[in-house]
Image (spheres, rainbow, N blue to C red):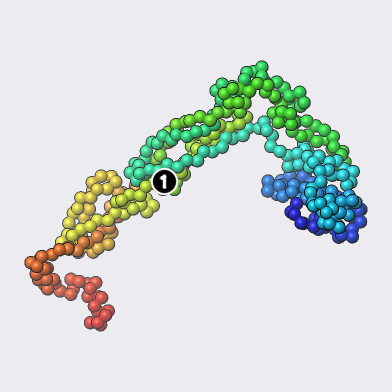
Amino acid sequence: MAKGKDLYEILGVSKTASDEDIKKAYRKLAITLHPDRFANATDAEKKAAEEKFKEINKAYEVLGDKEKRSNYDKFGTEDGSQGFAGGAGFDGAGFGGFEDILSSFFNGSGGGFGRRNPNEPKQGEDIHVKINLTFEEAYNGVTKTIRLNRDETCSTCKGTGAKDASSVRICPYCKGLGTIRKNLQTLFGQQVVQTMCTNCGGKGKIISEKCVTCRGNGYVRKEANVKVNVPAGVDNGVSMTLRGEGHNGQNGGAKGNLVIAVGVIQSDKFKRVGNDLYMNLPIGYYDAACGCEIAITTMKGEAKCKIPEATQSETKIRLKGYGMKVLQKDAYGDLYVVVKVETPKGLSSKQFKLLKAFEDSLSDSQYPQLKKFKKGIFGK
């Protein structure tokens, strides 16, 4: 219950309400929160109902007791001037103890929000790791060995947690059932409630001497090496899951999983976009003007790249099938060669004269983009 929240408001009654009105309001709210009404509810809804039930019980514990109600009306707390401290008993209406009512509502055998059976199989926890691959490893695929620490079944006791078979005996309180039953008087009348046996923790068995290897846990932490086959074409940020390579389960439950986050180091030469690759190819002024054929190194090996005549800088030339391996398919993306025409530097006076003579020999029609640009500015 939130600190400072008005108890009358919680029960939906006024401060002048009679004892009978308070009792009726409490009963009405308690019935609406009965576990049978939440049989098909989500875990979050069940949790909220349980918290609300605790809240109205606390409010009724105070307002259903004349002395506590008087202190609350005068000082704002059930204990008078000494501060608000939650009471230990639920003694305002002749019902069973507060914890017993909660037990009958939320931990009983008749449905409701019962606790998890400690003997039911429980899957082991997942292990999360990250591996980094080179660009070449991502392209070709690779086998990696991951070293990790995980919980595994104790080989000494085979998971029982006991020193030997004679160290395990039936719990004398629950007779091996793991639960005990008792009668409680609740606001709905007398009710038989089944609760977990606290003597054995619900397991039905008691270990007199624990296994010296696992100290009674049934599992030990061991170092393991797990081989991971990373497929060709894997991309940065991809997650891989290896089932059953995580921590050991409990009570015969399945092992957890190994979840691998893949990181790929960027290539200095290639840029990946989906399954396509891009690379820059610097060429000289002459090759760009006259065209040529250049041998380039791709991820598949050497390939011929044909540069057409009059190729402009930033032209993209497609080499089909020379891109990235498509994940889990017998296919490849494409390689786009981006031409970068490099202007020569450090020309001699002779080279300048030759270049000028060559430039003067050209007509405007041989510079279509430049001609278009000039026409836009000068209107010619």
Residue of label 1 = 263
- Under circle 1, the secondary element is strand
| Side (left or right) of 11 relative to 377 | right
Dot 1, how many residues are within 10 Å of its Cα: few (below 14), some (14-19), or many (20+)? some
Residue 79 in sight from this viewpoint = yes
Which residue occupies 74% across, 33% down? 196
Give coordinates of residue 331: x percent, y percent. Answer: 35, 45
| Side (left or right) of 293 relative to 22 | left
Q: Quadrant of residue 312?
A: bottom left
Q: Quadrant of residue 289?
A: bottom left
Which residue occupies 24% across, 60% down? 340
Q: Is residue 126 above or below residue 332?
A: above
Check the picture and name the quadrant holding the C terminus: bottom left
Which residue occupies 80% across, 32% down? 181
Q: Is residue 350 above or below residue 331?
A: below
Residue 60 in sight from this viewpoint = no
Give coordinates of residue 65: x percent, y percent. Answer: 88, 49
